Image (cartoon, rainbow, N blue to C red):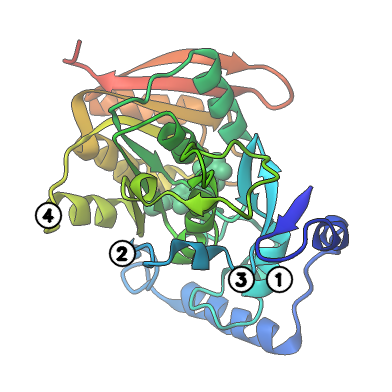
Amino acid sequence: MAFRFNFSFGEDAAEADDEPELQLGTPQRERAAEAAAQCRDATPSEQPLRLKAAKEHHVPKDANQILENKTMEMVAGLYSVKISTVEKQLLDGLHGEDLVSKSVLAHSDLVPGVYEGGLKVWECTFDLLGYCSETEMQFADKTVLDLGCGAGLLGIVALRGKAKEVHFQDYNSTVIEEVTLPNTVANCRVDGDEGKISKPPSKRLKKAKCSLDLLAKCRFFSGEWSKVSQLLLSGSKPFSKYDLILTSETIYNPDYYGALHDALSQLLAEHGRVYLASKAHYFGVGGGVPLFEKFIEERNVFRTNTVKIIDKGLKRFIIEMAFKYSS
Ligand SMILES: C[S@@+](CC[C@H](N)C(=O)[O-])C[C@H]1O[C@@H](n2cnc3c(N)ncnc32)[C@H](O)[C@@H]1O
């Protein structure tokens, strides 16, 4: 079911449920073709988006404003913006990264260095959410990073589990602005009278207000991993390394393994843990679990432990990582 904040429930949902495939109009097609040609023609050192700069995204004073015109649905028991609606809105060409046109033109959810797939919720997010719930993973008083967050559902679960601080990172600023931030605000709503986090789905949602205390625990970043690490480690705000890093479907491209490994080793606390969810193989991109584990072994910084295998359809894994020297 989908619904729209500040609009009546139901009608919009019914309308939006059976979405036709996205079609590009002529201006969108021309813009996307031009951008694709720029990327293709640039030499590797010139490729403008390869090392996308890091940016921190701040929550506006009136956080509820983020939810205006957003159509929401329930995903894994959490509020999540309806992606087909966001995609349609993003086709207006007014959003700097123009991700949707580029993705449609490339016939792919991944356009390396341009769009890294964060608009949709990928399968392994559900695996990792399931693992967190089965193992009753403890978030209380922990500092948590949802790395390559997309919709940010993993970070939101940590936030609702009373984490001390939760940071969200995605490659694309559009994903943070249009998906991660609205999802976080929607799931930070507290029932007016009792001050409790409203348990979705809640008929009282319209009465609910965003908890500024919960939101104050969150920070949002976009950019390439090495740039985001740099921003965190040398930024003006105090930064304490993460007790937990949750990351789903982030090892599909072997070209990024160096940056990912370095970000994990720079940002994880001495006795922290990484929980990484991934498919065994990513056909057409080349990455996957065996290749990533080999990379980790060669770097000799982390030890890995497969904590869950999901053997339905394409085999999927949840891997725990810790520093080799840690307890
Ligand atoms: C396939 S999406 C998965 C999104 C989300 N974790 C999920 O499971 O639904 C991969 C995510 O990894 C992030 N990512 C991939 N390569 C990256 C890079 N080189 N630098 C920064 N972020 C990157 C992107 O932000 C993207 O959202």
Q: Residue 102 carries which label?
A: 3
| Residue under pointer 4 | 234
Could you say whether the residue bearing mark 1 is in a helix, strand or loop?
A: helix
| Residue under pointer 1 | 88
Residue 213 at what x, y percent from top left?
A: 34, 46
Q: Which circle's residue, 3 or 1, is located before the other in the chain? A: 1
Could you say whether the residue bearing mark 4 is in a helix, strand or loop?
A: helix
Could you say which is closer to the camera, residue 40 or residue 223? 223
| Residue under pointer 2 | 55
Dividing the picture into quadrants, the one containing residue 303 is top left
Q: Which circle's residue, 1 or 2, is located before the other in the chain? A: 2
Could you say whether the residue bearing mark 3 is in a helix, strand or loop?
A: helix
- Residue found at the far front of this picture: 193
Q: Which residue is drawn at 53% across and 27% down?
A: 128
Residue 154 at what x, y percent from top left?
A: 49, 36
Dividing the picture into quadrants, the one containing residue 30 is bottom right
